[in-house]
Amino acid sequence: MRNLNSLILEGNLASDPLYTPGTSTTTDAARLLIDAGTDVPAMPVIAYGRLAVTVREHLRTGSTIRIVGRLGIDSSLDAMTPVVIIAEHIEIKPVRSAEARAYAEEAAL
């Protein structure tokens, strides 16, 4: 059952993404920390390639996101357990202005 390494995680970014541009031998990478609530610790997430560029451009601390990914190992971490989530798809919850929220609530009545 090796093909069952996939997960979905929702939460808020605990800090701004850390973007590392690619070189001739590596690809772009964006590392972020997603806070999924008080019951669990914040989880490290890595996005690679074009997804990393999108993360850099659109996500900030407090952004609400849903990540579809898989478990992986980040050998650059000095932690005892370097397990991270490798993001394959990220959905960003849109941020509405106060006027847009009021209009949507009024229209729903």
Image (cartoon, helix red, strand yellow):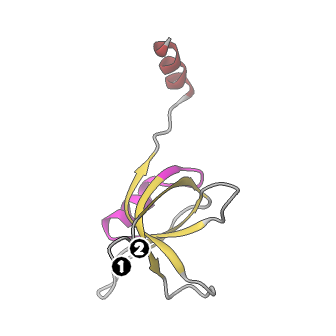
Amino acid type at mark 1: Gly
Q: Earlier in the sequence, mark 1 or mark 2?
A: 1
Q: Which residue is found at the position 44% from the left and 53% from the top?
A: 58
**Residue lying at the far top of the rendered structure:** 109
- SS assignment at label 1: loop
- Label 1 close to label 2 by CB (< 8 Å): yes
Q: Which residues are magenta?
A: 47-65
Of residue 75 and residue 23, the one placed in the foreground of this image is 75
Residue under circle 2? 29
**Image location (x, y in percent) of residue 18:** 52, 69
Total marks shown come to 2
Residue 49 included in the magenta stretch of the image: yes
- SS assignment at label 2: strand
Mark 1 neighbour class, 10 Å CA radius: few under 14, some 14 to 19, many 20 or more? few
Residue under circle 1? 22
Whether residue 81 sits left or right of residue 3 in the image: it is right
Q: Which residue is found at the position 30% from the left and 88% from the top?
A: 25
